Amino acid sequence: MTIDEQTVDKIAHLARLELAPDEKAEMIADMNKILGFMDKLNEVDTTGVEPLVYMTDEPNVLREDVVKQVITTEEALKNAPDHDNSHFLVAKVIK
């Protein structure tokens, strides 16, 4: 499979990108290089190789969630530029 200008236009449209003509040419070259690399990977014999799910066998080391400092609603709203008695007030962003 090779990438052509129509494919780049379609991908750019889906990604909501506007590409200049020189950028399109660079993108075509880059994407074709990526596909060439993937073709090389397809040539490797992976018979008997288990699919990799995780990069390591080590378990995640997670810390316990511990509440270290509790602030009251009054303290949280003290420096807010606009609030009522229990909520931050912000400008409406959905029309």
Image (spheres, grey):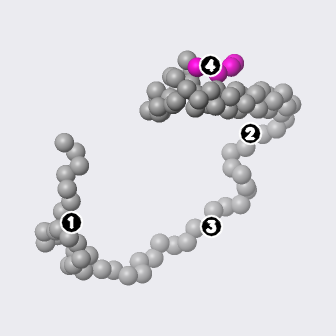
Question: At numbered mark 1, what does the secondary structure look like: helix, strand or loop?
Answer: loop
Of circles 1 and 3, the one toward us is 1
* Picture quadrant where residue 38 is located: top right
State the CA–CA distance, disc 2 to disc 4. Answer: 32 Å
Q: Residue 22 in magenta?
A: no
Q: Nearer the viewer, mark 2 or mark 1?
A: 1
Q: Is residue 9 above or below residue 48?
A: above
Q: Residue 5: name its quadrant.
A: top right
What residue is shown with label 1?
A: 88
- Give the mark, 4 or 3, whose residue is nearer the N terminus: 4
Name which residue type carries label 3.
Val
Check disc 3 and report the residue beneath it. 61
> How far is mark 1 from mark 3, CA to CA?
36 Å
Say whether residue 40 is visible: yes
Q: Secondary structure at mark 2?
A: loop
In the displayed structure, would residue 61 be above or below residue 28?
A: below
Asked if labels 4 and 2 touch by Cβ distance under 8 angstroms, the answer is: no
Residue at image coords 76%, 28%: 36
Question: Front-most of 17 and 62?
Answer: 17
Horizontal side, residue 60 vs residue 72: left or right:
right
What residue is disc 2 on?
51
